[in-house]
Amino acid sequence: MELLKRAKQLYDVNQILELEHAIEFASTAHADQKRDSGEPYINHPIFVANKLILWGMDIDSVIAGVLHDIVEDTTVSLSTIESLFGGDVAFIVDGVTKVSKASADMENLTNYLPQTKDNLSKLLIAVGQDIRVLIIKLADRLHNLSTLKYKSPEKQQKIARESLEVFGPMADRLGMGRVRLQIEELAFSYLDPVEFKRLKNLVAKRLGKNSRQLQEVHQEVEKTLKEYGIKAEIDSRIKSIYSLYLKLQKYNNNIDDIHDLMALRIIVDRKEDCYLILGILHSLYQPIMISRIKDYISTPKPNGYQSLHTTVITHNKQIVEFQIRTFEMHEFAERGLAASFHYNEQKRTKDYKSGRPSSTLPNNMQWITQLQEVVTKLKNGEEISRDQLQIDLFGNRIFVHSPKGDIYNLPEGALPLDFAYLVHSDIGKHAYSFQVNGKIHPFDKPLQNGDIVEVITRKLSLPKSDWKNLITTTHARNKLRTQLGHLGLMNVIDTSKMIREKTVRNIKRIKIRPRRKK
Ligand code: MN
């Protein structure tokens, strides 16, 4: 079997034996079931396990991938799985089962109504305890999307919409760019097939005209880099239909304004070479706008994406975007968090088992810690509003810096106190005033991406009850509540609905509607 051949290069002999056992066990359990396509059911979990191996996941995840539908779809119980494959595998399978149950009843997160709150809680609790559950769900969703044509039109719409609203953004948040792309393209092709086809044809026409010229640019750059003695891999990437669709809405549907329909990607060994190449490109070609030069290496995107971007006019008057990055950055851009299981399996697995996110999680993954806080609240039976969830989990994120240069990740619209509490609860507690980019900054003015934020503390300065209107994150709210409680100011604290609603209005939400034809 193809899967086992690949697995043998990654896992040791005992792990392979266990994997074989799992496949045998799952084949028997699903023996009398078929997929809607008429295929034997076992093909589905095998596909999922295969993906997990390709993504370099640890063996527990792969085995859980093989077993992921057993508890839900057969008479086999979770305790049987636990006795046969151990507690860790059972824990992950349980999580995947809970997510499936939750999302089966849930229209989608953005429309969720009070009566589905319990399911939403299940989803978050399942995911929050072990991020591997989510990665398995992504593989599962990918296969369900690729066999979507066997479902009824109503089901197709529902699954496609949910994929774009929940699973695409989740993959993006995990930095799994390639998976996000696959999910989005498949889902969008079902959600709006007419528009999908139209854009596809439009892109094909454009590229047909330009691809020979682009080939010349490719060769010219290759030759130049060789002269400088830089070893680089150059390839071209075509913009996905769904991201083109989103971008066109921003640019009044004018495809002439889209300059990154096709981009050239330059991948090198060392970070220094990225900047060197940027310099070389700019001396070879005219960059079209300084604002189009993006240094995501020194300031990564909130999901960890790193690369240099620049758009230039070439000698044959073509506008071309270049993306320059190292192999390591490229690997992360494609595989995201999944990649780190492969590199640092032991450590991470251990930390995730304890139910705590690893303290070595990169800064851009701080949202996982924040997810856990939301989960804890739900577990304690506390109310959490949909709007607060939007802010914490699905809103856009910004990066701000401490004066020392440490990077912190916050939701868009976050206020200075959110930053202070994220740095340390004592910093929040004694916050007296703020300096942003060297200037005094009021408590109620949102931070911007890239801001350098300094918290001025005073030993005698203490939290005030109206601070509850000056924070937006669950994290800060929790800390403040505790501190006010200690100070005897607790009675005034109630979730300040008004402020939250105001903040939410500022948060861009993903809205997917079929485009109206003009
Ligand atoms: Mn499944």
Image (tube, rainbow, N blue to C red):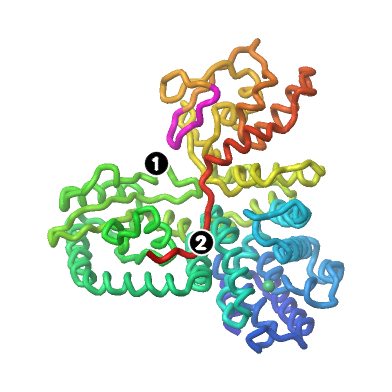
> Quick check: is 496 in the magenta stretch?
no
Mark 2 lies on a secondary structure that is: loop
Task: Name the residue: 30% across, 61% down.
Answer: 255
Residue type highlighted by circle 2: Arg
The answer to whether any part of residue 353 appears in the image is no
Q: Find the magenta span and give its range.
A: 443-452
Q: Is residue 245 above or below residue 194?
A: above
Q: Are marks 1 and 2 in contact (CB under 8 Å)?
A: no
Residue 337: quadrant of the picture = bottom right
Question: Callout 2: 10 Å neighbours few (<14), some, many (20+)?
Answer: few
Q: CA distance from mark 1 to mark 2?
A: 36 Å
Residue at (71%, 68%) from the top-left corner? Answer: 64
In the rendering, at what x and y percent does residue 273 appear?
A: 30, 50
Extreme-front residue of the structure:
518
Query: Relative to 135, is 175 on the left or the right?
Result: left
Q: Amino acid at mark 1?
A: Ser
Q: Quadrant of ligand 1?
A: bottom right
Provide the residue designation for mark 1.
Answer: 298
In the rendered image, which residue does mark 2 sit on? 513
**Rendering coords of residue 25 (x, y %):** 77, 80
**Mark 1: few, some, or many residues within 10 Å (few <14, many ≥20)?**
few
Q: Quadrant of the C terminus?
A: bottom left
Foreground pick, 305 / 416: 416
